Every structure is written in C-alpha cells, then in structure tokens.
Image: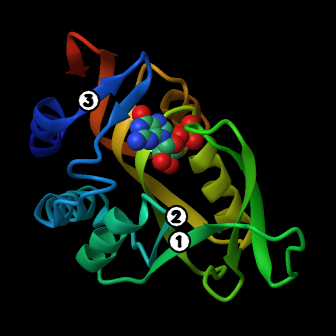
C-alpha cells in the first residue's frame, strides 16, 4: 500500500522531466524536508520492525538522508556505499559495479569490510528504484560480506521500469512507499 503522505507531496511538489525522470529536489534529495523524511523512516520501521534489522545500507549521495532517518527509527547504524573515485580498490573493501540511471556511466561502489559483518541483517534503503542497478549493487555488497538482505525500503519506485518486479521475483522483499504507475510532463504522476 502506498504511503499517502509521500504520494501527496510528490503530486504537489514533484515535477516530471521527459518520460522517465521525476524531480523531487524540493523535498527529498536537494532541499530536504526533514519532517517528511522522519515520517518515511518511521514508516520503514513499521513495515520491517519484525525482521531483526541490525544495519541500514544505502548509496551516496541521495540515499543518505533517508537512510539516516530509517536508522534512527530502528536504533541501528547507517552505512553508505561510496562511489569509488580511485582506480585501485583496496582489499579491505567489498565492491560492486553499478550503472547509473541518471548519467548512464558505470562506476564501482565500495563498503569497508569493517562495516558489513556476516551476522548482519541488512535493510537496504534508497530514494528511487528504476532499473534496479543501484539495488543490485547494494545486494551484492551485502552478500559478499556473508550477511543477509532482509529487505529493501524504497521511497519512490517507478513501477513502469523493470527493477522492482525483477528484484522481487529474485526473492528480495521490496517495499516502496510510493509506486508510480505512470507519469507525464502534462498529466503528472499516478500511483498504484
Ligand atoms: P536504478 O539503479 O534503479 O536504475 O536507479 C536508482 C538510482 O538512480 C537511485 O539511486 C536514484 O538516485 C537515481 N534515480 C533513478 N530514477 C530517478 C528519478 O526519476 N529521479 C531522480 N531524482 N533520481 C533517480
């Protein structure tokens, strides 16, 4: 079920660019409405409170703010995967490749082996789910650590793109607070 607080905010303050980019930088990933993000963190907690989450994992930069509020709601640490900028990847890092949805480039994401442990039960959090490349990369990091992915909490899933269905079919519990069914520059956004 959709989270109406976020859906209403997207209708009011989100803007559609072209056929597949939703801009939410008035409240989610540039200017940030911390009261809304706090509510999003609490909603993830309501949905995943019974699965023993020990860590929240996200990807820099725009996942960090949401993941902080989720971590606060669960009372666990938040770890963010960094986009690697150097050629040499040290052996003390887990690494995965991600193709950026917004830029089309492939980059490495890294997390220190100190911060993902085999006993961890990880809830992955991100702002958007589109083709699922970011989520695939984060899942790969958790599995390299021998830890468990207990689910993924996504603020906005563009459900007309294939990532969500594909990753659910692969057995990961994905909960999206706003599932966009269709969007258009003139008509705006509709939700499932
Ligand atoms: P995916 O890897 O699932 O294709 O895309 C997810 C990532 O791309 C997210 O981390 C998000 O930062 C970015 N992204 C994908 N679609 C959108 C969009 O419509 N708007 C914005 N602002 N970011 C997006």
Describe residue 70's horizontal placement relative to residue 99 as left or right: left
Q: Nearer the viewer, mark 2 or mark 1?
A: 2
| Residue position for label 3 | 15
Mark 1 burial class by Cα count in 10 Å: few <14, some 14-19, many 20+: many
The yes-or-no answer for disc 2 within 8 Å of ligand 1 is: no
Q: Quadrant of residue 95?
A: bottom right
Under circle 2, the secondary element is loop
Numbered label attached to residue 183:
none
Which of the pair 188/166 is nearer the observer?
188
Which of the pair 47/139 is nearer the observer?
139
Of the numbered discs 3 and 2, the one sitting upstream in the chain is 3
Q: Quadrant of residue 12?
A: top left
- In the rendered view, would you say 188 is above or below 63? above
CA distance separating discs 3 and 2: 22 Å
* Quadrant of the rendering where the N terminus is positioned: top left
Which of the pair 170/153 is nearer the observer?
153
Mark 3 burial class by Cα count in 10 Å: few <14, some 14-19, many 20+: many
| Residue position for label 2 | 60
Marks 1 and 2: in contact by CB < 8 Å?
yes
Mark 2 burial class by Cα count in 10 Å: few <14, some 14-19, many 20+: some
Under circle 3, the secondary element is strand
């Amino acid at each position: 079920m959709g989270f109406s607080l976020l859906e209403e905010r997207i209708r009011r303050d989100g803007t559609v660019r072209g056929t597949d980019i939703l801009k939410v930088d008035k409240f989610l990933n540039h200017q940030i409405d911390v009261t809304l993000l706090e509510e999003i963190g609490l909603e993830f907690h309501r949905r995943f409170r019974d699965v023993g989450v020990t860590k929240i994992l996200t990807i820099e930069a725009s996942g960090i703010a949401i993941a902080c509020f989720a971590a606060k709601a669960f009372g666990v640490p938040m770890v963010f995967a960094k986009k690697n900028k150097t050629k040499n990847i040290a052996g003390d890092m887990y690494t995965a490749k991600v193709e950026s949805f917004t830029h089309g480039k492939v980059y490495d994401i890294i997390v220190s082996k100190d911060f993902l442990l085999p006993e961890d039960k990880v809830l992955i959090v991100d702002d958007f789910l589109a083709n699922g490349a970011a989520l695939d990369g984060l899942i790969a990091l958790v599995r390299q650590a021998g830890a468990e992915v207990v689910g993924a909490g996504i603020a906005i899933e563009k459900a007309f793109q294939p990532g969500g269905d594909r990753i659910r079919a692969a057995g990961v519990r994905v909960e999206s607070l706003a599932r966009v069914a269709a969007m258009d520059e003139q008509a705006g956004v509709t939700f499932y």
